[in-house]
Every structure is written in structure tokens, then in C-alpha cells.
Image (cartoon, rainbow, N blue to C red):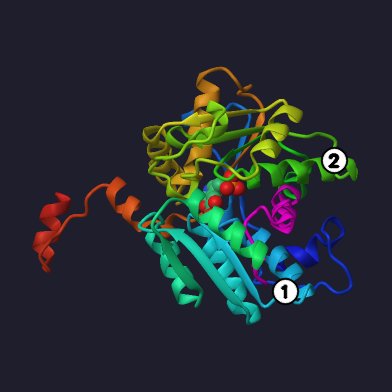
């Protein structure tokens, strides 16, 4: 039963008697065993896909947003604000609508996937398209939320990270253990931080006897952490992770170091290959940024950085329908045909 993450993982979250246990039935997303893709990638152990696209707004952001909005309400706030590459704005807009407060979202003009823009607008957020990139939008939001009575709901808000730890608990609950490797895309670096925190917490509470190695992957044109310096003009087809100055940079590096993991990059071509591959081999449609986890696992196995006999979990952070433009562009062409039986037989090569 989907009860929402606040009620389900209350003992691991900063919840008080005064915290409203709001929910849109987020979390409890499918952890899907992969056989076909596992074979393609050369995984001899186990490969599991955590399909975060099954959340109410279609991405993992719902986990952090429900916690951040609950705490905002507890503190008496009536307005929330964020910068976003799309998914955070969709989640903020939805939860604000759900609880009847205002959401103001700043998105890079022309820089977010169509479905995400549609979501923020239809949920009724005030959507401002900034003539600049995500990093510039976040600077503006940080300044304004420090000076006005509006709650910042980017992952600089620690409650966002808290809520996102719940995905790690779910994985452990389902597998009865932590995986050997947890592989995920890295943009603003909040999620890798949250997963590591979650795995550590579950381990400390005695719920599991192991912790995973955290493997994070940035897009090549936005690989600030890999390169060791901010990128002023990040570029990638995976607009969700087109971020040049990750807010949780230090904590992501700490997660990598503490877990004996790695943070590397994948090219746009590798991302798009993985995007098509997971759809065609498993019937799972994720957005391009999410496919960076699959591309990253493939790279790690090819380079010999990971033990192929291990247990892997790849995090598929967002739903493929978020980004119809990339989907259509990357998919095979459709076939137009006249509305008669003979024409369809001809196209299919069926001759009775
Ligand atoms: C599908 O929505 O930053 O490393 O503003 O949408 O925690 O940032 C989205 C990020 C991965 C990267 N996959 O996670 C935003 C935003 C998807 C995403 C990431 C994002 P972080």
C-alpha cells in the first residue's frame, strides 16, 4: 500500500508532532529486476532498476518535495520557490497545489523538457522563464528567498535531502540488503547525497549489514565535479542535469569518498544509446538524464571499475514522457498508411 514516504519512514525523518503528514502517495516505486539489459551490459550478478518515474509527478523529486513542503507548512510558510531544470519545478508546483500555497519557479528559458513545463503551468505555479541557465536561476532564488518570506525548496533546503533518503530505505526493504553498487545520474548532486545518507542511516540502525559503493555520473558537457571546477556554460542533451555548479558538490564528493565509489561522466551519445536501450530491452521509458545511470554502469563495466558479478541498482530518476521531443527524435520513424486492409497488409508484408 502506498501511504506516502512521510508516514512510512517517519522514524528516519525529521518529523515532529506538528509536521503535517501530507502525501500524494509518492514513493514505493517499482524496483524492477532486469534480465535483458543486464545481459546486454555484461552484468553476471543482479541488475535492478529503481523506476522513480512512477512517482506522482513522474520523478524522484516528489520524495524531497513532500518533506520540504510539510516542514514549510509546519513553519507557517505560505509560499515556496525554486530554480529548476524541470522536475523540481513540477514537484513544487504539484505539492503547492495540493496543500493550497503558492509556488514560484524559475526555469531556464527554452531549457526544460516540454512535459515538465506543461506540469508546472497546469498545476498553477507562477513560472518565470529566466533568460539564462539553471545556475543563474538558482543564484537569483537563493538571494530572493533570503530576503523575502518565501521558502527555498531547492536541495539547499536540507529537508529535500531528508525526503530523498527514503528511496534508499525502499531499495533495502525490497532487496533485504543494500546493493553492492548504487548507480545514478548527478546534476545538482542532491540525490547522490541523499541516497548515501539513507544507506548510512539504515546501516547504522541495523536494518542492513552492508553499504553500497556510490557511482555517480555527470553529463560530459556539465561535468563540473569530474573536472574539478564550475562550468559557466554547461551543455548536454540531458537537460535535467545541465548544471555547471552543483549545489551539493562537497557532499557528493564525500559520498563518493566514504563509499569508495566514483563520480565520472558519460557523453551525450552514451546517454542516448542507453536511453533507447533500456526502453527496447526492458520496456522501461525514462528521460535522458536518467539513462546516464545505465550509460554509467556500462562505462564502469567496460573499464573494469566494477565487479560484474555484484548486485547493482541503477536509479531511473524520471519518466520518459517528460521529454517527448527527445523521445520522438531518438525513436524509429512511424509508418503512415492508407485506411484500408490491403495497404496495411502491404506495409506488413503479409500476403494471404
Ligand atoms: C531526471 O529539477 O535539478 O543530482 O531542478 O531531474 O539531485 O540534481 C533535476 C535533477 C537526475 C539530478 N535525474 O539529480 C531540477 C533538477 C533527473 C533530474 C537529476 C535531476 P541531482
| Most foreground residue, 287 or 20 | 20
Q: Which mark is residue 337?
A: none
Work out whether mark 1 precedes mark 2 in sequence or the reverse, and give the earlier one.
Answer: 1
Badge 1 crowding class, 10 Å Cα cut-off, few under 14, some 14 to 19, many 20 or more, is some
- Picture quadrant of residue 203: top right
- Picture quadrant of residue 67: bottom right
Give the residue pinned by disc 1: 22
| Most foreground residue, 179 or 37 | 179
Residue 151: percent from left, percent from top: 67, 67
Task: For mark 1, give the secondary structure.
Answer: loop
* Up/down of 295 relative to 116, above or below: above
Give the residue pinned by disc 2: 203
Magenta span of residues: 148-170
* Alpha carbon distance from label 1 to label 2: 27 Å
Q: Residue at x 51, y 57 (%)?
A: 84
Residue 331: percent from left, percent from top: 30, 48
Badge 2 crowding class, 10 Å Cα cut-off, few under 14, some 14 to 19, many 20 or more, is some
Residue ranking furthest to the front: 147
Amino acid at each position: 500500500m502506498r501511504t506516502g514516504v512521510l508516514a512510512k519512514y517517519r522514524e528516519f525523518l525529521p518529523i515532529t508532532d506538528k509536521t503535517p503528514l501530507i502525501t500524494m502517495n509518492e514513493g514505493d516505486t517499482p524496483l524492477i529486476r532486469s534480465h535483458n539489459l543486464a545481459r546486454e551490459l555484461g552484468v553476471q550478478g543482479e541488475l535492478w532498476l529503481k523506476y522513480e518515474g512512477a512517482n506522482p509527478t513522474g520523478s524522484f523529486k516528489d520524495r524531497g518535495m513532500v518533506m520540504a513542503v510539510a516542514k514549510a507548512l509546519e513553519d507557517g510558510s505560505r509560499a515556496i520557490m525554486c530554480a529548476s531544470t524541470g522536475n523540481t519545478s513540477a514537484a513544487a508546483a504539484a505539492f503547492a497545489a495540493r496543500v493550497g500555497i503558492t509556488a514560484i519557479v524559475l526555469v531556464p528559458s527554452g531549457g526544460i523538457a516540454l512535459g515538465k513545463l506543461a506540469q508546472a503551468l497546469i498545476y498553477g505555479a507562477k513560472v518565470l522563464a529566466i533568460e539564462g541557465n539553471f545556475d543563474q536561476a538558482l543564484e537569483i532564488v537563493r538571494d530572493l528567498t533570503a530576503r523575502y518570506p518565501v521558502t527555498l525548496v531547492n536541495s539547499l533546503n536540507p529537508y529535500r535531502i531528508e525526503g530523498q533518503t527514503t528511496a534508499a530505505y525502499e531499495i533495502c526493504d525490497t532487496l533485504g540488503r543494500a546493493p553492492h553498487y548504487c548507480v545514478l545520474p548527478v546534476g545538482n548532486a542532491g540525490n547522490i547525497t541523499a541516497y548515501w545518507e539513507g544507506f548510512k542511516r539504515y546501516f547504522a540502525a541495523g536494518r542492513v549489514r552492508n553499504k553500497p559503493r556510490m557511482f555517480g555520473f555527470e553529463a560530459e558537457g556539465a561535468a563540473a565535479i569530474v573536472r574539478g571546477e564550475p562550468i559557466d556554460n554547461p551543455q548536454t542533451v540531458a537537460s535535467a542535469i545541465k548544471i555547471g555548479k552543483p549545489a551539493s558538490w562537497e557532499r557528493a564528493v564525500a559520498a563518493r569518498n566514504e563509499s569508495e565509489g566514483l563520480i565520472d561522466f558519460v557523453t551525450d551519445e552514451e546517454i542516448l544509446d542507453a536511453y533507447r536501450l533500456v526502453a527496447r530491452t526492458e520496456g522501461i521509458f525514462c528521460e535522458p538524464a536518467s539513462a546516464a545511470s545505465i550509460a554509467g554502469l556500462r562505462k564502469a563495466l567496460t573499464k573494469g571499475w566494477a565487479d560484474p558479478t555484484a548486485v547493482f541498482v541503477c536509479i531511473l530518476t524520471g519518466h520518459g514522457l517528460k521529454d517527448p521531443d527527445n523521445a520522438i527524435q531518438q525513436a524509429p520513424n512511424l509508418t503512415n498508411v492508407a485506411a484500408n486492409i490491403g495497404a496495411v497488409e502491404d506495409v506488413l508484408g503479409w500476403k494471404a
